[in-house]
Amino acid sequence: MAEARLKPEHLLLKRFLRNKTAVVGLIIIVALIVIAIIGPWLSPFSYDAVDRQAYLQPPSLQHPMGTTQSGRDMWALTLHGLRKSLVIGLVVALLSTSIAAIVGAFAAYYGGWLERFSLWIIDLLLVIPSFLLIALIAGNSSGGASSWLLLVLLLTLFGWMLSARVVRSLTQSVKQNEYIAAARYMGLSGPKIIVRHILPNIASLLIIDATLNVSGAILAETSLAYFGFGVQPPDTSLGTLLGDGARQLSSFPWLFAGPATIIVLLILSVNAVGDGLRDAFDPGSKASGKG
Amino acid sequence: MHLIPALKPRVKDKLRIMATTLLDVQNLNVRYANEAGSLHAVRGVSFSLHAGEALALVGESGSGKSATAMAIMGLQPDSASIEGSIRLHGEQLVGADDDALSLLRGKSIAMVFQDPLSAMTPVYTVGEQLIESIQVHENGSLSDAKNRAVELLDLVGIPEPHQRINAYPHEFSGGMRQRVLIAMAMANNPDVIIADEPTTALDVTIQAQILDVLQIACEQTNAALLLITHDLGVVARIADRAMVMYAGKIVEQGSVNTVFYDSCMPYTMGLLGSLPHAGNAGTNKLSAIEGNPPSLLTPPTGCAFSTRCPLVDSTCLQQEPSLIKITEPDHWSACAHHQIIRRDSLTHADLFQPKPATESTAAKALPLNPSGSKNEKVLEMLAVKKHYPLFKGSVFRRRVGTVYAVDGIDLTIYQGETLGLVGESGCGKSTTTLSILDLEPPTHGTIELFGNDVSTLDSKQKRLALRRKLQIVFQDPTSSLDPRMSVFDLVAEPLGIFDYNPEAISARVNELLMLVGLDDSYLARFAQQLSGGQSQRVCIARALALEPQLLILDEPVSALDVSIRAGIVNLLQELKLSLGLSYLFVAHDLALVRHIADRVAVMYLGRIVETGSVEAVYENPAHPYTQCLLSAMPIADPEVERNRVRQIPLGELPSPASPPKGCHFHTRCPKKSRLSADQQQLCVEVSPDLNPAMPIQKMQEQDMPVYDNHSGSEASYQNTKESTSAHTSACHYNYLV
Amino acid sequence: MYFAKFAQVNHSATNISYIHANLVKLNKIYALPNDKQQQLQSTVGSYLLKRFLNYAILLVVATNLSWLLAATQLNPRSLYEVSNPPIDPVSIENNLLSRNLSDKVPLSERWVIWSSSILLDWNWGQSPRGGNVGEEIGRRIWVSVRLITLGSLLGAGLGVLIGTWSARRQYGLSDRTFTFLALLGLSIPSFVIANLLQVLATQINDVTGTRFFEFVGETGLHGDWFGAQLLDRVQHLLLPTIALTILGAAFFSRIQRNIMLDSLNSGFVRTARAKGLTRSQAINRHALRVSLIPTSTYFAFSVATLFVGAAFMEIIFSFHGMGEYAVQTIQGHDVHGAVATAAFGGVCVLSGALLADFMVAWLDPRVRSASANSV
């Protein structure tokens, strides 16, 4: 009762700020995004420039993170990779959560054949081993500058199903609320009820889901890149760098250390923020005490 | 004012042993650490519980009564801090560690919880859980424990305990589970049983059964009972002494008779006066306590009730009155004005004078709904059936049968009339309301709204036009308001659907809020910032936005606290008068229906078993089911409660998926046992129709068949339909008293 | 991919308890008398049949879609064209034709040959270099089984222990530490963990001057004394098992913690304590038992998906199992191998779903009785 008299946003912020891991995570994410944006100005080298004086050099003053076999500056490559990984993560998360929200909410609200059909499609996409199919298509595409776009589409195509299932069951429980029945008996149409009453009330889930989908997409790209199915050269991502570095880990650790640190930092931060959001949004969490 | 009743034998016995104090609570304080601060839930509570007595702790939600119980059991959440003293047999419990307390819990002091479903572990059988309670404190063999468990189940009235001991909790009904919880509490013959709202989630007929079981449990184990409840009727029925709690403090304490008949605390008096009962049924208005309880995040400096109290003056605001003994032997009150109340013999009627039942100033702002005479039907349902396929299984989902939720009912509501629809949960009340609101043709029969058959609604426009004349107010106000919308948006939403312009919407919203007694400071608030009563007012405002003619009120006050209910009931009655509304009032609270309705229909397993004017049905209930409902209904009057002869239906409501053949009620009918075998045969085989519920002489005068009224029923049935005020009942033996 | 989704399980966990609540609600209202339930048992068989039929359709559609994609995207011809010395185009074509891999044959004809050989002979085709796909998979499945059994069991067990421990000390130091470690475990790509472990093991081997950690293949050189072969296998299994355990523990500790928290705050734990059980007894006997129901469904799923999902472990530690095969078929333009692996992956997912259902039915009497004694 008393707790409810606080403003909802204020309460959310208070709960989120209490979670120190999440706050630190948020700061790191913001910092990484800023670094990614101003990246091209942070390095004297372009990511695709080749330094013919330095092939496979360990870190030095000139190349703070060393160079690759082909003489490219690791620092510049990492900055570019971070950019690409962030873009992939954000776009995939946004798209797949949107698809999940629409499919899940409509399926649950209308039920009947629409629900059965949606569930069948979801099941089908879950039954197909997505990793294999993405690898199949991405690994054999022509490559080039737009290869990451294809990857984004594939990751989205195979990334929304579990979220949609969650949205569906959450919608089913929101649907039980009498304000949905009240809206229907007022004469509000189905799509309007979904947009006005259901989606705003599962917004917390969608935000958390989108956050976790960011890390999910980045990890997925990384895994694909390890086998060479990720972003194709000359373009690069953290995953591609990491995959290349991992194979020569014991001999040339600098190829691995930089991208690995950045990617773990990034994903850890995103996951921590997702966790913090979940704690903040979840009114049933034990932390909120019993009034 | 009242005669002191002769003490019943049981009470006399008790007086002798009451000298021993079992549980002694002194200056108990419970604080919860909360995000919003520290919530001071219990503020200096002191009382003692004596051997053999039944002590009731009465209060509304948030008054601190459950927090007190949890503190005594040592089961408070980790975020709670406890100060003061709790002594059981002189042994201090505050500060004792979990190991020490667990030796006492279940052994010396046992507890019966409110929600019997979540209170039992779903993966263990009832027997396993009961045996565990026994073996925690005893080193006996498993077979001994099992025998004892069977014995206990038998004692609390579980049929076939030998078989049912292997059932899982989900295979039991709510009432059965509550019985098992009582059996668990009895297992080790405790000295004290704490029952926390043990019947709140149950239907009135089951509640009556469970209260009996609880009394049996206390008698069998010689335990003292600490009963925590919000229901004054339950207190009147079962308790010897009562304590009233408000805002974390005990504000009045005494024997049940003193508290009910000679209360010296305005809060108690207000609570008692706000209940609908036979006495105020005609006056049309309940005496309501205005306002809401204070927040315990910042405990009040003066009397916590001062903001709602009609007797308030400056002394009340200066300091909080403490609980003092005002008369011997044992009447305590925490009111600065208790002497005035005693001196002038003030009653709730003096304090909470209901405002005269005229249109309020706000209501005048709207014109009376001019359309429609008293004879215009707003709703007519004929032979309506609504059946659902029944699916079963999560892993192997399939159709296994049909739920006969509504199975052939006739209902008519005239312009300006309130029809009360009563029955136990699962009887089909909700399905009835939903089948009206859906505007879809039912499985069978016809539904006519304002003269339009819903099966002829072929266009969206026609449907929408009908929608706005028909609105609903739900039971749970917090669930019926979208938590992400402001009060303005909530009330404006229906207007937006029907294309009102922004100025008109704004004006109308202000008007509506005024109408339901909220000022415009509420416009910007969100649903979760409102109290239950305020939320329900917003729901009513929203339902009225489109000037409907028929409002369906689905248990509109049952989720609210007692002190809030009366205000909402008064508002509904006021609105009905000033706006010329018709109500379909669905409720399980029979007293409330009597108070608000013109006519009443009693529903059982999808059928109407009795209908008629409120006076006729309540004064001369003809159907045994109605008689049972009325008899099970608790009355907040200890004298009446003690001297009542109860007629309680046997067992529980059968599944609507497999209703009994013949008369649906015959499996539970207390009247049936008094019939001859032939007569019983009729009940079992033939389903009775609604027939006039009039005395036998009158029936003979009118040359109606007496013993065999089902065969000639068509004609008489048609007759009764013509006059809706007729009192009819669906029992083969209406005449038999 | 599957591990990436692990972080989301919290929501699904709440759904499960929600579904249970509803089930129980329904069951309460419409509980059927026992005699009616008896009559209904005969329909369960047909219901199961329906479900399997649906699964079969899903699999057939998924497999055909995979074939379509593989046949159009992969290019077996390129394998021969790049070889040195060059191979005569005619013999390339013959080779491809004999294995039904030639892109010069219309797609529909290749499909008829491919599908009819599966339907008639249960022959899943040949790889571009020859070799029967079905035989290869039959061999590799057992490698995968040996690789993942121990690791997934240990991971789940450890995860449940840590999760239960954490939940009981919510927001304490140990809970915060474990929460952070689990988060870290889920945030590091699995191949990074495997690679780091390998580096670490090399260091230890070098420092101690032994070959205690073995990380190439399933077996190596070993003595001929009794148990030497077993010891050798264990040594080889050590590192991948540690890696799988870390990942599994990180995942399951998160799930178990969240479910356990729900369970800890439930009414039945309070009832158990009110009976006289101490807090620990109440938690161990009641809360833990109930919380294992949803956790076990995740376990069923995760084991099933690990068959193809352990590709990193297999490649890094040179176990020639299904995960490695999946990657190799795509890199090696092996149309039939890729399709067969996809089909196998689909079977794994569906078996996981079935297994999860059966586990719930086995552990949860509410579901058990709701499915009319069918299990």
Image: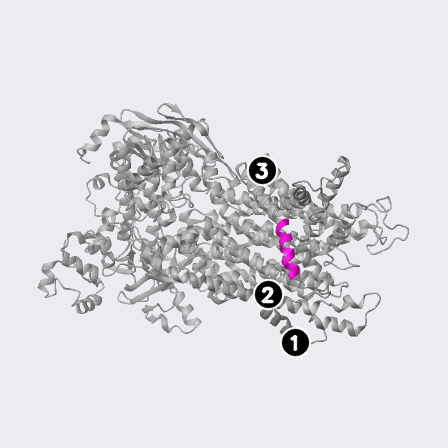
Residue position marked by numbered label 1 in the rendering: C109
Circle 2 chain: C
Q: Work out whether mark 3 precedes mark 2 in sequence or the reverse, and give the earlier one.
A: 2
**Image quarter of residue B447:** bottom left
Packing grade of label 2 (10 A; few <14, some 14-19, many >=20) is many
Q: Disc 1 residue type?
A: Glu
Q: Disc 2 residue type?
A: Ala
Circle 3 chain: C
Q: Nearer the viewer, mark 3 or mark 1?
A: 1
Q: Work out whether mark 1 precedes mark 2 in sequence or the reverse, and give the earlier one.
A: 2
Span of residues in magenta: C135-147
Circle 1 chain: C
For the residues bearing labels 3 and 1, Cβ distance under 8 angstroms: no
Q: CA distance from mark 1 to mark 2?
A: 19 Å
Q: Residue at x 51, y 61 (%)?
A: A194
Q: Are marks 1 and 2 on the same chain?
A: yes
Q: Disc 3 residue type?
A: Asp
Q: Work out whether mark 3 precedes mark 1 in sequence or the reverse, and give the earlier one.
A: 1
- On the image, the x and y values in percent for residue B428 come to 32, 58
Residue A106 in sight here: yes
> Which numbered circle lies on residue C175?
3
Between residue C330 and residue A97, name the one nearer to us. C330
Q: Nearer the viewer, mark 1 or mark 2?
A: 1
Say left or right for B477 vs B380: right
Q: Nearer the viewer, mark 3 or mark 2?
A: 2
Residue position marked by numbered label 2 in the rendering: C62
Q: Which quadrant would the N terminus of chain B be assigned to in this image?
A: top left
Tag 1, which secondary structure? helix
Tag 3, which secondary structure? helix
